[in-house]
Image (cartoon, grey):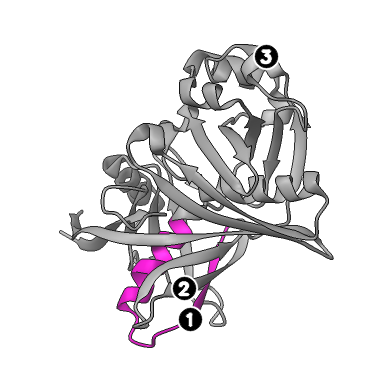
Amino acid sequence: MRAYRFTTVDVFTTTRFGGNQLAVFPDARGLSDAEMQALAAEFNLSETTFVLPPDSPQNSARVRIFNRVAEMPFAGHPNVGTAYVLGQADEGRPRAYRFEEPAGLVEVTLLRDEGDRVTGADVAAPQPLRIGAPLPISTAAACASLPEDAIITTRHAPTLAADGGNHRLLTEVTPEGLAAAAPDLGAFRRAVAAHPEETRGFLSLYLYCRDGAAVRARMFSPLTGTWEDSATGSAATPLAGFLLHLDGAAEGRWDITQGVEMGRPSLLLAGARRMPEGIRARVGGHCVPVLRGEALL
């Protein structure tokens, strides 16, 4: 029987049992792809990460991210939480890590308190913002179980966007709409079937309402088993980049509150900047350790 150590952390929060849960296997050598997927399904969290030696010695580690049903090319809170777990145990007291992931190299900077203790991390999206196709208002409204007049289209229609992770349907809604929203699994399935080229067989919905630099958000991804996500870094970064695209500024920062309706409030500190290659975004936050143990295989 083989034993693999794991740690669970709550990400994008300073309060235990808030934020988004993550399981981290800091040494996954010897685990097969099927075993990683089975462990992710067993934990039944939005994501689980597995840390392996890097392919290049110039990088810190190779990090594989699995949701309940598939491996992901990139995700925000798994990178923040993985860096936090590794940083807490790393006697070399690093300031940053560089993770190899399917979406590309991911730069992660550790956050430390006045006593130089690791408290969280800030992660850069591995790719510039890519703005995809808009989808009909009726599609976004149906997926969120909302009337169409809850969708705000003054600045943009519901629009697909990504920057290294899965694309998200960015949709501005009224405050009342944000509070009332609930995912409709059948509507998600119909949306994918009706728009196969735009969605590429996958759809998650990121609802937000904005008050200056303060943003409230909710994220639904029932097609991957995540009915609602309490903190979604890989949605916060394309949203930050998209808001910068709309504003026309050189750079910007937004404090995104998510997970309130789930009873797991999260705070994601997102920013974006125009670069020669396009708009680049980052997201950061704090972490709290919760569980340690071993998985027996």
Q: Distance between the residues labelled 1 and 3?
A: 46 Å
Q: Are marks 2 and 3 in contact (CB under 8 Å)?
A: no
Q: In the rendering, which numbered label is found on residue 81? A: none
Q: Name the residue under label 2.
A: 110
Q: At x 62% / y 29%, what residue is drawn? A: 201
Q: Quadrant of the N terminus?
A: bottom left
Q: Do the residues labelled 2 and 1 touch (CB within 8 Å)?
A: yes
Q: How far across and how far down the image is residue 151, in percent? A: 65, 21
Q: At x 64% / y 60%, what residue is drawn? A: 126
Q: Mark 1 points at which residue?
A: 95
> Is 97 left, or right, of 209 in this rendering?
left
Q: Circle 1 sits in a helix, a strand or a loop, which is it?
A: loop
Q: How far across and how far down the image is residue 187, in percent? A: 55, 15
Q: Given the image, on which type of amino acid does mark 1 rest?
A: Arg
Specify which label sits upstream in the sequence, 2 or 1. 1
Q: Quarter of the image holding residue 133?
A: top right
